[in-house]
Every structure is written in C-alpha cells, then in structure tokens.
Amino acid sequence: PLTCLLDIAGVRASAAALRGAFEAVTPPGTPVLHAFAVKATPLVPVLRLLRAAGIGAEVASPGELALARAAGVTPADTVLDSPAKTPAELRQALALGIAVNADNPQELARVDALVQSAPTASPIGLRVNPQIGGGAIGALSTATPTSKFGVPLRDEGAREWVIQACLDRPWLTRLHAHSGSQGMPLEMMVRGVGATYELAEEINARAGRRQIDTVDIGGGLPVNFGSDDESPTHAQYARRLKARVPGLLDGRYGLVTEFGRSLLAKHGTVLARVEYAKKAGGRPIAVTHAGVQVATRTVYAPLSWPLRIAAYDAKGRPKSGPAVGQDIAGPACFAGDLLAENRPLPLLEQGDHVAVLDTGAYYFTAHYAYNSLARPGIYGYSIHGDDVRFAAAREPQTLDELVAEAGGGAERDALRYL
C-alpha cells in the first residue's frame, strides 16, 4: 500500500549539473569538493551512487559518518559538521583525516588538545555565523542573530576573536558558513558567502600569508515544490556568486559545498493506495497509507512545506474529471495527519493511488515511527527504452524487525527484574 521511488537518472543528472556549475565559474585546477549533506537522504546506496558521480559527504553525527564510510566515501571527501561533537567524534575524525569544522570556542579548545596530543592530516576550519537574517522558514534559518550554529560574527568582540584564534593556530585553514536553506533567497545566501570571504581576506592580510586556503560555503539551495521546474539551479547560484564575490572564485581559494535537498528532492516520489474514501462535513477525504511517517514536516508545518499530489486510478493511469476539494489523509491516529487539506484533485476513490512528489530528500528517508508504522521500501528506478528497471535502496521493514527495534529481542523481559 506504500512504496517510495527514486529516479536514478535524475540523481546522476543533478550531480553532474552541480559539478558543472562550479567548474564553469572557477579556473581549471581549483580544488572543489561537493559534499552531499547526508541528513537529506541517509541511504548507503544513494551515497555510493553520488560517490561514483564525484560527490563526497557532509556528515553531522556518528551515524551519518558510519553511513558515508559504508558507502566507500573517503576521508578526503568527507566533512564533519555538528554543533554538538563529542571528544570521541572529534578524535575519530582527526585520526581518519576527515575535515572538521569547529562550531564554537569550547569545541576549538577540545580540538587544540587533540591536535597537540596526536598529529592529524585533517583540514580544520571554524564555522562562523554572518548573522545576515532569516528566510521564510524560521526553523531552518541558520544565520539569524541568535542561531545556535557557529561563531556569531556581529556579536561584540566575536570577529576579532575569530581572527586572533586563526592567527594563534597556523593549522586553522578553513572558514565555514551555511546561510542558505529552504525559504532563503539567493541574494541573502550570497551575502552570507560574501561576508565569510571578506573575513578570510582579513585573516590572511593580518597573517601576512594565505592561511585560510579554503572556504566552505555550505549548501541550502532552495527547491521549488510548486511545479516540475527546477529553480533556482546550481548554475544560477554559482553565476551569482561569481558576479558578487569574484575573489572567492578566482582560484586562490579551495571550495567546499554541502548541498542536500537541491540534489535529491525532485527525484523522489511516494506512491500510496487510497484505502478508503469517505466524507465528513461534506468534504471528501481520501485515507491513504502516506502520512506523518513519510512527510513529517508537511504534516506538522503544512504552510511551510506544501507538497504536490498527483491522482491515479487503481491501474496506475492518471485520473481525470473535475477538480474537487478533498483532504488527503495519512494512516496515523491524530486528526492533523493530512498531506493536503481541501486540495482540488479529481475525486479519489477506494483503490486509487496518490503520488506525493518532490520527496527525495528529508521525507521518506527520514522515517517518523508514530503508531509503530513500519518503514516503507525505497526503490531506485531507471528507464531503458520500454524497459523500467528497479532495485531496492532499502527493503521494507518487517514486523519482526520493528518488534526487535522496540525492545522485543533479548531484552524483552528486562524490566520485570527491576
């Protein structure tokens, strides 16, 4: 009753377009690492697919690092970001030679001690917050004055602290800022990158050498969830950076990007069967198997995360007929479990199907286990003439696996002995 699909040709095309976008605005030989934000689609087969397309991994937890390593992503193509890295995480990353971006002064002090105790090949940077303001979705705005991420550059004394911290540590060679995300205009993203570049220039001028040799500009290119149009594009963003921050792209600095949603979102679809069709208060309701477990953000914040829905009949053919306002409901036991409310669509009937579009990132790969709903299967597909080929990126979760995950294994009787 519920299946998730990934368009493999689309993923490959997006990876190639990203690489081409920055190759077009940088001199040959400029070191550029595109590190996919693993949080967006944490699936080992997807990470392997992207690795084959020349894309590395940006990780923000031990779990994400384990996924990247399982996918064969090399330490040289991996970047560790997180506002809450433990000493063990830092120690592991530095031992492996993974790039690390320290988030705050206390974390940098931990890195100081680790660097002094054991040599490392890791490039080490400092995350800064240019405090340029928020976008349309407050929960995703990482460059606000009070954001939890990075060193806030406009706070009193903070900029000078960053400069001195770099001058005191010759091994601190990178700056990192992530100003973009869904709901953030391109111009604001560019301002954030520009502020980081200007800081790098100031540090290098004070040092009398090119100490900061790489700028990690983060990711966060917004996605158009309103149509099939892919806009803005990575090429548009790269060209705007070239026009507004030309010194960053003239070959003197290496670059790191951390795009996630913009690489995968458009290439994912949730397919769900309409289990029942009913009415309440005169409004039609299609009860499906896709809800909060695969579209958590949309269910809890529908105004920020509206999704497109396409209607199909029981045989998979596009439905026709007049558009009727109807609710598309999920299976979870609370009234707000709705993918869409009063959405005009051809009237859905029992046995029909809905396709929830643009869900390749942060949706079905970030399962929410409300009501102990099992994780659905995720399948990649490719089209070869009249032939469509499928392969499992993640098999459906069995009920036995769900029970074991819920403490139903060897520990099932543990509490009775307390």
Image: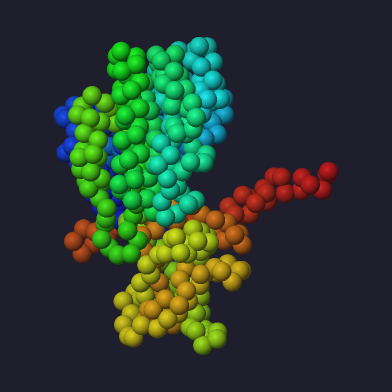
Residue 315: image quadrant is: bottom left
Q: What residue appears at the point 42 percent right and 45 percent down from the top-left corner?
A: 133
Q: What residue appears at the point 50 percent right and 61 percent down from the top-left corner?
A: 301
Q: Is residue 209 something that shows in the picture?
A: yes
Q: What residue appears at the point 34 percent right and 34 percent down from the top-left corner?
A: 195
Residue at the front extreme of this rendering:
156
The total of numbered circles placed on residues is 0
Q: What is the x, y in percent for residue 45?
A: 38, 45
Q: Nearer the viewer, residue 63 or 406?
A: 63
Q: Is residue 6 something that shows in the picture?
A: no
Q: Image quadrant for the C terminus?
A: top right
Q: Is residue 14 left or right of residue 401?
A: left
Q: What is the x, y in percent for residue 71?
A: 39, 38
- The colour mode here is rainbow
Residue at the bottom extreme of this rendering:
282
Rendered view: 153 above or below 272: above
Rendered view: 334 above or below 246: below
Q: Is residue 1 left or right of residue 262?
A: right
Residue 244: image quadrant is: top left
Q: What is the x, y in percent for residue 371?
A: 61, 62
Q: What is the x, y in percent for residue 125?
A: 41, 25
Q: Nearer the viewer, residue 139 or 36?
A: 139
Rendered view: 179 above or below 231: above
Q: What residue appears at the point 41 percent right and 36 percent down from the top-left corner?
A: 130
Residue 311: image quadrant is: bottom left
Q: Nearer the viewer, residue 4 or 29?
A: 29
Q: Nearer the viewer, residue 41 or 237?
A: 237
